[in-house]
Structure formats: C-alpha cells, structure tokens
Image (tube, rainbow, N blue to C red):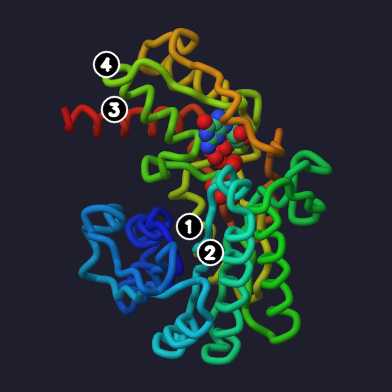
Amino acid sequence: MVLTIDDKELAYLVAKLPLKTKKFEDHVKELLEILHFEKKGYESQFEDPEHRLWRIRHILDKLILHSASLESYASIFSIVEKARPDECYHLAAQSFVSYSFEDEFSTINTNINGTHFILSAIKKKAPECKFYFAASSEMFGLAKETPQNENTPFHPRSPYGISKVTGFHLTQNYKEAYGIFACNGILFNHESPRRGFEFVTRKISNEVGKIKLGLSKELRLGNLEAKRDWGLANEYVRAMWLMLQQNEPDDYVIATGETHSVREFVELAFDHLGLDWEKYVIIDDKLYRAAEVYHLCGNYSKAKKKLGWEPEVNFRDLVKIMVDADLERLQKRL
Ligand code: F7E
C-alpha cells in the first residue's frame, strides 16, 4: 500500500523499480493497493485522471485506488482493515515548506495526526505490515553539524519540519512500544521531471524552458544562497523500498553527500540552454521564508553499508535531466 497525496513518488515506485528489481515487479503484479488521500475532506472524489493522476495514467488499470482523508481516523482505519497491507509507504503530507508558514495549524494537524492515525490503524488491523515513514532533511533545519547523519540532532525551522520530527518520533515509538516494523527514511531533496512546479528546482527548469521558447521573460526567485543536497527521485524511491526488505526496521539518511546553492542550479540550468541567467532572474523579497534552512548536506554511509544503496546521478546531470524534460514538454505543446 502506498499512501500519497500526489503521485510523484508513487509513479516511480510502480514504474521505475520494476526495471531494476524483479522481486519488486512480482510484488507489484501480485497486489498494489494505493491509499490515495485527497488534500481536503473526505467528500472529494478522485480528480480527473487527466489532471492529478497524470503521472500514473499509464498504469492506472493495474492499481486499486482508495480515497480517504488524512484528517479522519475512521476513513483510514476502514481502508487499512479492508486492504490488510503487507507494506505501507506513508508519503502523504502537506509537503511545501513555504506554505507551511502560511497555514501552520493545518500543516501540523494534518501531517502529525495523519501519521498517527495510519500507525494506529496498522497496529490494530495489520500489525505484521512493514511501515515506511517519509521523514525529511527539513528536520535538521538549522543543522548542528555537517554532513548530517542519523544521529544529528534536529532543529526544525518550519511547521512542516516540526510535523516531520513528530512523525519521526511516532514511527520510532510504534516500533519500540508495539513491535511494528517501522522505518524512517530521512530523505534529502529528491527531484525529477515529475516534481511539482512550486518547488524551486522545477520552477527553474520550467521557467528556463519557457524563456528559451519565448513564452516567458523573467524568473522570480527568493533566496539564491540556500544550499541543498539534491538527488534524483527515482533513486531515492529505490532506497525506500530497500528499507522495507531488510530483516530489521531501522532509520536511514538518503542523500548524495554533495551540496549546491539555488544560485548554482540557476546558473547551470540557464547555461545548459545557452542563456545568461542574470538577464532574466529577479530577486523577490516575498519569496524569502520566515525562517530559512541555509545549508543541508547528507551522509548516506549507513544506507550504503546496510542497504547497498548509492546515488548514481550527480547534480549537474540532475539539472540537465530536468531542463531537457521541461523543454521537450513545452516544445510539444507549441
Ligand atoms: O526550496 C529556496 C528556498 O521549496 C529549496 C520538500 O520536498 O525538500 C523540499 O523542501 C530552497 C529553499 O524545497 C525559491 O528558500 C529560493 O531554501 O524547493 P524547495 P525545500 O524547502 O528544501 C525537503 C527534503 C522536503 O521534505 C520538502 O517536503 O530554495 N528558494 N527561491 C525557493 N524555493 C521555492 N520553492 N521557490 C522559490 O521561488
């Protein structure tokens, strides 16, 4: 079972992993139940597949979709009871850090309660189910050391980061108190052409493509000096799956070990299309965050040792993959 609000990671779980691991392919063919949460309320139905589910349109006939609300224990409980999952990937959350400053109560309530409801339902109705929680590098926030590993103390800087710290502890507590096979994946930023347009990498790759094609004249950004450890989402999803194939549950940092600024991403993206970024980028104070996370860099040595996981795509290639994909998509629409 995969719990998600958007279908980005889901698409990779289903579409990418089978190419690499036969066992996962069999698993998917056997049964893949997807608990697909709507953002608001349980009255809403699935959106038209042309829109929200575009990333998994090609495999919709292989999936069983359930609609539920992260805010309703009853709705989650009844689906866990019906599906009785073997594995549960909990990716559902309000995940846009910037928005969490504007709507802190919703972000904190939905993200924390949603995680708690799912864990409780699993404890009661599927105690053998292996559980994955999408923790986040945002938990490190104003990081106490560099690079960050599984033992680095947390100092979250946003309501989103706070909600993830609590989810992390809930996951650990259900493991320790109730014996649930529960893992935290502390994933650093993972990007791809399926990324939402509100996140900075996709905003840049999309806008630079539009500028190249004469569809846009400027790109407005906030803090160019913030640094992130950016990897390719496909590879990170494979790490998520590996965590649930181990004999014992554990927590893992998944990262590349490299850090780059937003400015570097911008420079490479524009340079890749032969453009001078300084002619187009406008700094907009409104896009700065109330409290910024300035510098993140992950140490993935535990994942390498125990899961045999390592990233393959570097920063430069990631930028090219995203810019090329957006340019191609935009060209087709012209
Ligand atoms: O911001 C700066 C911004 O929104 C990255 C989520 O998936 O990864 C993601 O969180 C940086 C920040 O991602 C703009 O200030 C500058 O320093 O792409 P982002 P994020 O906040 O790092 C973690 C691991 C998660 O768990 C989250 O769910 O870029 N920045 N100018 C900007 N950011 C945005 N969005 N838009 C700008 O115009």
Q: Which residue is mark 4?
A: 214
Q: Amino acid at mark 3?
A: Leu
> Helix, strand, or loop for circle 3?
helix
Reply above or below: 68 against 268: below
Distance from Cα at disc 2 to Cα at disc 3: 33 Å
> Helix, strand, or loop for circle 1?
helix
Q: Amino acid at mark 2?
A: Leu
Q: Residue at x 39, y 11 (%)?
A: 275
Mark found first going from the N terminus, 2 or 3: 2
Distance from Cα at disc 3 to Cα at disc 1: 27 Å
Q: Give the percent coordinates (x, y) of residue 141.
A: 73, 45
Q: Which residue is mark 3?
A: 327
Q: Nearer the viewer, mark 2 or mark 3?
A: 3
Q: Give the percent coordinates (x, y) of residue 297.
A: 68, 39
Q: Is residue 162 visible?
A: yes
Mark found first going from the N terminus, 2 or 4: 4
- Residue 66 vs residue 188, the one in the foreground: 66
Q: Nearer the viewer, mark 4 or mark 3?
A: 4
Distance from Cα at disc 2 to Cα at disc 4: 43 Å
Mark 1 near mark 2, Cβ–Cβ under 8 Å?
yes
Mark 2 near mark 3, Cβ–Cβ under 8 Å?
no
Left or right, 239 with reference to 252 = left
> Helix, strand, or loop for circle 4?
loop
Reply above or below: 101 against 14: above
* Ligand 1, image quadrant it occupies: top right
Q: Give the percent coordinates (x, y) of residue 290.
A: 68, 38
Q: Which residue is mark 2?
A: 242
Q: Amino acid at mark 4?
A: Gly
Q: Quadrant of residue 193?
A: top left
Q: Which residue is mark 1?
A: 238
